[in-house]
Each structure stands twice: as C-alpha cells, then as structure tokens.
Image (cartoon, helix red, strand yellow):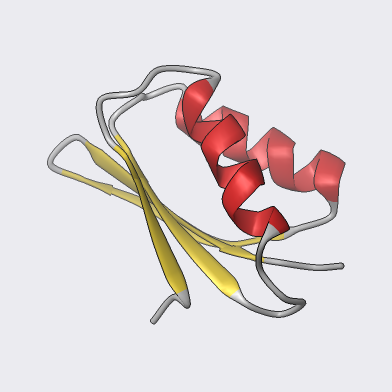
Amino acid sequence: MADETLDAKGLNCPLPILKAKKALKGMGDGQTLEVLSTDPGSIADFQAFCRTTGNELLEHSEAGGIYKFLIKRVV
C-alpha cells in the first residue's frame, strides 16, 4: 500500500509528471507514491522520469484504461 495516492486521471502530459514531482518533493526517503493516470503516454513518461530523478519505479500496470504507477522516493 502506498503512503500517498495522486489521482492524475484525465490529465495529459506533462501534468501527471509535474504533479508527481511536486508530491514526491514533500515525501520522505523510502516513502511511496501511487499515481493513477489515463494518459497512455504516461508509461514511457514515468519510466524516463524515474531514470532521470533517481526515484524507483516499483511497478506499473493498466486496467480498464487506468494506468497505475508505484514510485519509491529516493533522496
């Protein structure tokens, strides 16, 4: 279970990434953020975001057009 959930459904790139970045900034090392998105491009976006920021993409999945990402904050 994630420490926080960000509902970014209905938002298109780059808004889900920007909102996730803001949410992660307020979290502590090791905490997890669940992001919910409907943007199909968010899969590649969150993979690239985690690679460049050093945060860890623990898992991602899709069900019914909703993409779910679990990101671990790494300081």
Residue at image point 71% right, 55% down? 25
Report the front residue among 4 and 63.
Answer: 4
Relative height, residue 13 to residue 70 (above, below): above
- x, y percentage for residue 44? 58, 30
Relative height, residue 63 to residue 58 (above, below): above
Query: Total number of numbered labels?
Result: 0
Relative horizontal placement of residue 19, taking residue 51 as reference (left or right): left
Relative horizontal placement of residue 3, taking residue 62 as reference (left or right): right
- x, y percentage for residue 48? 72, 34
Relative horizontal placement of residue 47, taking residue 3 as reference (left or right): right
Residue at image point 63% right, 45% down? 22
Furthest residue toward left: 64
- x, y percentage for residue 50? 73, 47
Quadrant of the image for the N terminus? bottom left
Relative horizontal placement of residue 9, taking residue 15 as reference (left or right): left
Q: Quadrant of residue 47?
A: top right
Residue at image point 56% right, 72% down? 32
Relative height, residue 39 to residue 66 (above, below): above
Q: Quadrant of residue 4?
A: bottom left
Quadrant of the image for the C terminus? bottom right
Q: Quadrant of residue 54?
A: bottom right
